[in-house]
Image: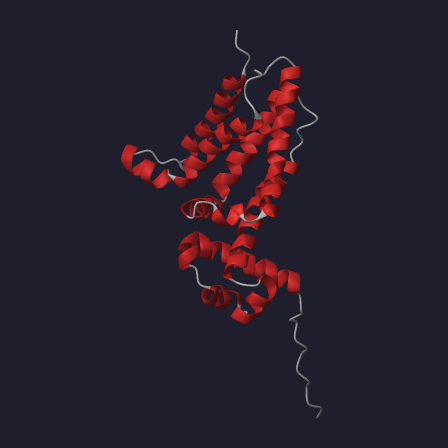
């Protein structure tokens, strides 16, 4: 009787997938524990890889943290790039971008936590990373284009710049997620409740468009 040979292993060497898995787990670890509290050993254990392999791919804990930040920001910038803004008027284009920002922040609490953690460290990691700063310049370019079109269409005021606008949109969308627990405890309002969520999504669009409207 012939001896049955063991089935070949389905495991393949896929460095890109390994790096993606590491980044996914690392994002959760940094978001949960902060930069100081996060442990590369814990990330390695949860990805079934080794600490040495993580260092091989990313260079060290700080480099891994920067890669996580880059991935977090890249996701929202990529989302903005996919919006069909050029085919509509400026008000509708801005509405789409605001709603996309709102939805992204709501779906990605780890992004909010990571940004909060980087602020605790006074943004020192972002300041030293030119690539991250260049990556995020795209949203300012997009908003600047929308503002110019809106002024050309006669619907937007001319004393607000793209950074002002980005700050206003980000502030509302970010606050809702970052402070929902303290806000809820203080004012007994669950910001994640579906009706409240829908109302907030509509409000931010109405507030921004009203603010940008040309003065009489």
Give the residue furthest to the top.
Answer: 216
What is the x, y in percent for residue 171? Answer: 45, 32
What is the x, y in percent for residue 146? Answer: 63, 25
Task: Specify the quadrant of the image occupied by residue 3.
Answer: bottom right
In this rendering, does residue 195 appear at all? yes
In this rendering, does residue 50 appear at all? no
Report the front residue among 184 and 70: 70
Look at the image and name its color scheme: secondary structure
Q: Is residue 163 left or right of residue 198?
A: right
Q: How many marks?
A: 0
Give the residue furthest to the bottom.
Answer: 1
Task: Specify the quadrant of the image occupied by residue 214.
Answer: top right
Q: Quadrant of the N terminus?
A: bottom right
> Which residue shows up at 67% across the image and 31% down it?
84
What is the x, y in percent for residue 114? Answer: 46, 48
Relative to 107, say whether 12 is above or below.
below
Report the front residue among 63 and 96: 63
Report the front residue among 115 and 32: 115
Q: Is residue 66 left or right of residue 185?
A: right
What is the x, y in percent for residue 17? Answer: 63, 61
> Which residue shows up at 57% across the image and 60% down it?
21
> Which residue shows up at 29% across the image and 32% down it?
187
Report the front residue among 63 and 198: 63
């Amino acid at each position: 009787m012939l001896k049955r040979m063991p089935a070949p292993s389905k495991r393949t060497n896929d460095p890109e997938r390994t790096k993606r898995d590491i980044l996914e787990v690392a994002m959760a670890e940094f978001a949960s524990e902060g930069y100081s509290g996060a442990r590369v050993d814990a990330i390695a254990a949860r990805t079934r890889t080794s600490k040495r392999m993580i260092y091989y791919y990313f260079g060290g804990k700080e480099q891994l943290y920067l890669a996580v930040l880059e991935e977090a920001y890249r996701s929202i910038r990529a989302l903005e790039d996919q919006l069909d803004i050029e085919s509509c008027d400026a008000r509708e284009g801005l509405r789409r971008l605001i709603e996309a920002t709102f939805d992204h922040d709501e779906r990605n609490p780890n992004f909010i936590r990571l940004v909060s953690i980087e602020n605790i460290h006074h943004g020192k990691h972002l300041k030293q990373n030119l690539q991250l700063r260049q990556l995020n310049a795209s949203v300012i370019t997009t908003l600047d284009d929308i503002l110019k079109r809106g002024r050309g269409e006669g619907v937007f005021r001319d004393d607000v710049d793209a950074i002002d606008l980005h700050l206003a949109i980000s502030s509302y969308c970010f606050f809702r997620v970052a402070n929902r627990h303290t806000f809820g405890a203080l004012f007994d309002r669950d910001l994640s409740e579906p009706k409240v969520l829908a109302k907030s999504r509509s409000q931010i669009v109405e507030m921004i468009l009203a603010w940008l409207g040309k003065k009489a």
